[in-house]
Image (cartoon, rainbow, N blue to C red):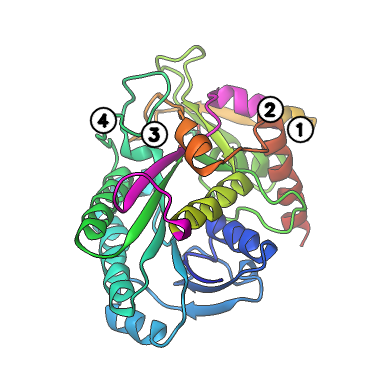
């Protein structure tokens, strides 16, 4: 099969391209390289296009033969989204509207969408299921929820069929350290801690230790990026087999179902690195719920998905191997 992968030069997108190649498929990567990397495109056809530009998008995609779309391209930082909401709505919502319009024009009717646990807001239950109320508390989550609503409506009004995958905290790197996470600036917990460990970054700031959690720091469900990539292939396969429940749209949580606090993740980083890592305590970061942990049973049951890299130490170890390789490159 040949797939269009928007944001395929980014973190989860590039790992999904890698998984597609491993399964004998190929990809056309569409990316504006605002945060993506050329080195992550793995020899695939690259379209350097911004989704906010509908005519450029239409021109670039004209005549392509596409079996399905994996849609990753988006702005994805909670903190940044509070400061530049218009940019977030333009990239994530308008960009997706343009993509769907061109997809429908071309008769491309399968979409796997990169969504997020941020659409739920503050959880009312210990583990979040897909039907949990959706009241995002940050702009990033608002934009992703708006896109889910747009996708669902589009699926009801057209032959389009879509699966939305709601990631909890994507983390780790390819096991062979051939791909991994590189953001500039880096803001995510594990790479920031590991950068501090390698001496390449500032000490880690722990964003708040006064949350209503056992050690006062935020609890998150960290899920390995290769497990996320695998779920994308399964979701596309489900669309191809037309074996999803409901008419045309479905959504699945992707997480391990186990929560780790910032302090616990930090301790795992120190363990893997084998030394203490400099850190300081800071203020809470705007838009951070205290706890986000998935109930991902539906993905297991309906997609046959089984995370294979569930241990936090294993997740951190792959990120550390990548950090060392990337720094020395
Ligand atoms: N975090 C932190 N210091 C950092 C980066 C993140 O304390 O330098 C915390 C953040 O407040 C959140 C958790 O680590 O509770 C995971 O944040 P990250 O940015 O990695 O992912 P997000 O939850 O925003 O997707």
Q: Mark 2 points at which residue?
A: 268
Q: Measuring from the top left, give residue 273's x and y in whole percent.
A: 77, 35
Cα separation, mark 2 vs mark 1, equals: 6 Å
Is 71 contained in the magenta span? no
Q: Nearer the viewer, residue 146 or 235?
A: 235
The crowd level at tag 3 (other Cα within 10 Å; few <14, some 14-19, many 20+) is few
Q: Which of marks 1 and 3 is in front?
A: 1
- The residue closer to the viewer here, 142 or 184, is 142
Determine which quarter of the picture holds residue 37.
bottom right
Residue under the point 69% across and 62% down: 22
Residue that carries the numbered disc 1 in the rendered image? 272
> Mark 4, residues whose alpha carbon is within 10 Å: few (<14), some, or many (≥20)?
some
Question: Secondary structure under badge 3?
Answer: loop
Q: Mark 2 to mark 4: distance in Å?
A: 32 Å
Determine whether the beta carbon of the residue marked 2 sits less than 8 angstroms from the nearest atom of ligand 1: no
Q: Which of marks 4 and 1 is in front?
A: 4
Tag 4 residue: 133
Q: What stretch is highlighted in magenta?
A: 240-269
Q: In which quarter of the image is the N terminus?
A: bottom right
What's the CA distance linking mark 1 and mark 3?
26 Å
Q: What element carries label 1?
A: helix
Can residue 101 be seen from the camera position used here? yes
CA separation, marks 2 and 3? 22 Å
Question: CB under 8 Å between callouts 2 and 1?
Answer: yes
| Residue 128 percent coordinates (x, y) | 39, 27
Q: Is the residue marked 3 within 8 Å of ligand 1, measured from its CB?
A: yes
Residue 145: give x, y in percent of width and height: 28, 46
């Amino acid at each position: 099969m040949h797939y269009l992968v928007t944001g395929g030069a980014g973190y989860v997108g590039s790992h999904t391209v890698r998984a597609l190649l491993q399964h004998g498929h190929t990809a056309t990567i569409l990316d504006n390289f605002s945060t993506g990397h050329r080195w992550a495109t793995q020899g695939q056809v690259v379209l350097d296009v911004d989704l906010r530009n509908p005519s450029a998008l239409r021109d670039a995609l004209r005549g392509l033969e596409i079996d399905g779309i994996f849609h990753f391209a988006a702005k994805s930082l909670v903190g940044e989204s509070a400061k530049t909401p218009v940019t977030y709505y333009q990239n994530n919502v308008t960009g997706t509207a343009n993509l769907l319009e061109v997809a429908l024009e071309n008769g491309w009717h399968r979409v796997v969408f990169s969504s997020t646990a941020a659409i739920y807001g503050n959880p009312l239950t210990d583990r979040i299921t897909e039907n949990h109320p959706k009241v995002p508390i940050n702009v990033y989550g608002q934009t992703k929820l708006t896109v889910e609503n747009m996708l669902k409506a589009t699926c009801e009004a057209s032959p389009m069929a879509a699966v939305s995958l709601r990631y909890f905290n994507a983390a780790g790197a390819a096991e062979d350290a051939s791909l991994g996470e590189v953001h500039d600036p880096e803001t995510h917990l594990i790479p920031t801690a590991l950068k501090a460990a390698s001496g390449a970054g500032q000490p880690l700031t722990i964003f708040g230790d006064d949350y209503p959690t056992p050690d006062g720091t935020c609890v998150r469900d960290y899920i390995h990026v290769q497990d996320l990539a695998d779920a994308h292939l399964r979701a596309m396969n489900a669309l191809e087999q037309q074996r999803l429940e409901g008419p045309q749209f479905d959504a699945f949580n992707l997480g391990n179902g186990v929560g780790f606090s910032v302090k616990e993740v930090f301790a795992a980083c120190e363990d893997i690195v084998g030394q203490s890592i400099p850190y300081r305590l800071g203020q809470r970061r705007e838009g951070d719920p205290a706890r986000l942990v998935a109930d991902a049973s539906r993905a297991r049951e309906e997609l046959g998905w089984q995370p294979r890299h569930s241990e936090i130490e294993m997740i951190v170890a792959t990120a550390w191997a990548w950090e060392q390789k990337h720094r020395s490159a």
